[in-house]
Image: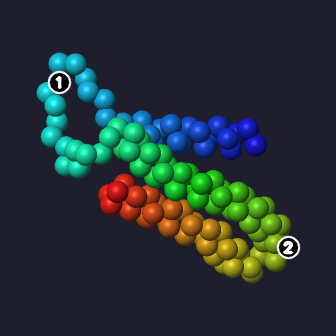
Amino acid sequence: MRTIVCVTFLSLFLSTAAFAQADQPGEPEATSTQDSSKSDLALGLIALASAVAIGITALATGIAQSRIGAAGAGTIAERPESAGTIIIMLAIPETMVILGFIVSVIIIFTL
């Protein structure tokens, strides 16, 4: 449980740090294509929402795949002909991460 919490906070930290805009002294200001009316707080919240959208789906997918994989390994040990079904069942939760990624991209580029 502690590992899950650490990974979640780490992914939130890395994603918000990637979208933070800090001015470095001595460097010219870069022109931004984003609306100048957005405050730094709004940009930070958008980045946080994007991180949550993909972080929670990835966490849930990992939990689901761990349980499916454990049960699938036992099933394949008893009935090797069911390997194709188990592989498909392992791939189904991955669609949730893809959906989370799409929502994250929509959040970043439309808000």
Query: Callout 1: helix, strand or loop?
Result: loop
For the question of whether residue 33 can be seen, the reply is yes
User: In x, y percent, where is residue 65?
Assistant: 69, 62
Closer to the camera in the image, 12 or 71: 12
> Residue 78 has which mark?
2
Residue at 34 percent of width and 57 percent of height: 111
Which residue is the extreme one toward the right? Answer: 78
Residue at 58 percent of width and 59 percent of height: 57
Q: Quick one: label 1, few (<14), some, or many (20+) residues within 10 Å?
A: few
Q: Quadrant of residue 110?
A: bottom left
Closer to the camera in the image, 53 or 77: 53
Q: Amino acid at mark 2?
A: Glu
Circle 2 or circle 1, nearest the eye: 1
> Residue 81 has which mark?
none
Q: Residue under circle 1?
A: 27
User: In x, y percent, where is residue 3?
Assistant: 70, 39
Closer to the camera in the image, 64 or 29: 29
How far apart in space, not on screen, are marks 2 and 1 (Cα)? 64 Å
63 relative to 40 in the view: left or right: right
Query: Callout 2: helix, strand or loop?
Result: helix
User: In x, y percent, where is residue 21?
Assistant: 31, 35
Residue at 74 percent of width and 79 percent of height: 82
Q: Amino acid at mark 1?
A: Glu
Q: Quadrant of residue 86?
A: bottom right
106 relative to 67 in the view: left or right: left
Q: Answer above or below: position of 12 versus 99.
A: above
Which residue is the extreme one toward the top? Answer: 26
27 relative to 46 in the view: left or right: left
For the question of whether residue 87 can be seen, the reply is no
Q: Answer above or below: position of 79 versus 73.
A: below
Residue at 66 percent of width and 78 percent of height: 84
